[in-house]
Image: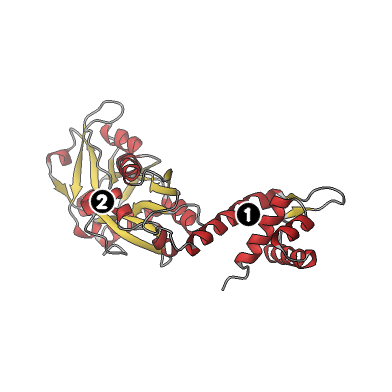
Amino acid sequence: MLYLTLRHYEYVVAVSKAGSMSAAAQMLNISQPALSVAVSTVEAHLGRALFIRRKGAPIRPTGFAKGFLAEAEALLARAAQLENPRADFSKPPQKLRIGCFSDLAPVWLAPALKRLRAEFRDVDFHPVVADFETLAADMAEGQLDLAITYDLGLDARFTRHRLSSVAPGAFVAADDPLARQETVRLEQLATRDLILFDEGLSVRHMLALFAKAGVRPRVAHRVASLEVMRSFAANGEGVGISYTAPLSDHSYDGLPLKRVEISDAFAQENIVAAYRNDMAEVLALPRTLKALAPEAAGDCDPDGQ
């Protein structure tokens, strides 16, 4: 149950715009004491002052209030749109913030943005690249509307639509014996020095896969990016493991390498479009999903099914 009502938000926004309690009360057609009580109620609930009040001077918003008032005004605009009988709810909001997991971004993000902008010409798309934890936290807090990510670290607050399914691959130097194989199993890789991503959830997921295979891996390096991983592998520093499959068969420093697919069926992972459950009505599904991954346009079952 929400403590503050839309009326509370309307009152504090009006005070900010009017610059005084009396002017805001007149604009809202209510008494000044009633307005003062409403503003005090909001401040008491938030535990923060919204306005700086000085005798003989206009009321000014506090530093905290500037962000709060902007969100309150956006909320009121959204509420007004919901009450508009002519509103077209097949369209997404005018501004859509899209996150993408850093490992997927080089392959997925730019093409998805290109298709989204072609599909929704009146929408301003804002891309964000981040790790698993940041994407989930930002969606939970309303800082992101949608994220392209692996189906990892997402709880019951989020709906997931499968866009694709991928198997992980092992990056090895061109002269590595594994380069002559088309596939490899996790059990084989456990005896090799491994190069994994230095990101909490990613590392835990990869170690869990080896545990499921009944083996204990030997981690030699943890790296921050896919290209560092590929460079290490091409230079013989170990075997890199990633779900991303770049088209190039050379590392950034020009050395050849090969990606050998890991064949353990349980290691496959879904790439999903994830969003907070209460965002479903404003994301223009399935048009948005089709733009994110055209090949998955008919595969719009939620929760990765």
Q: Is residue 260 left or right of residue 236?
A: left
Residue holding disc 2:
190
Residue 23 in view here: yes
Q: Cα distance, mark 1 to mark 2?
A: 51 Å
Q: Nearer the viewer, residue 16 or 167?
A: 16
Query: From this viewpoint, which residue is outermost toward the right?
Result: 55
Total labels: the figure holds: 2
Say which element carries label 2.
Answer: loop
Q: Give how far across and how far down residue 115 sits, in percent.
A: 30, 43
Rendered-image quadrant of the N terminus? bottom right
Say which element carries label 1.
Answer: helix
Task: Give the number of the disc on residue 68.
Answer: 1
Q: Which residue is found at the position 41% from the left and 48% from the top?
A: 98
Q: Nearer the viewer, mark 1 or mark 2?
A: 1
Task: Give the number of the disc on residue 9.
Answer: none
Q: Residue 197, located in which quarter of the rendered image? A: top left
Which circle's residue, 1 or 2, is located before the other in the chain?
1
* Disc 1 and disc 2 in contact, CB within 8 angstroms: no
Q: Which residue is found at the position 26% from the left and 49% from the top?
A: 293
Q: Give how far across and how far down residue 207 sits, in percent.
A: 33, 55
Q: Residue 264, located in which quarter of the rendered image? A: bottom left
Circle 2 residues within 10 Å: few <14, some 14–19, many ≥20: some
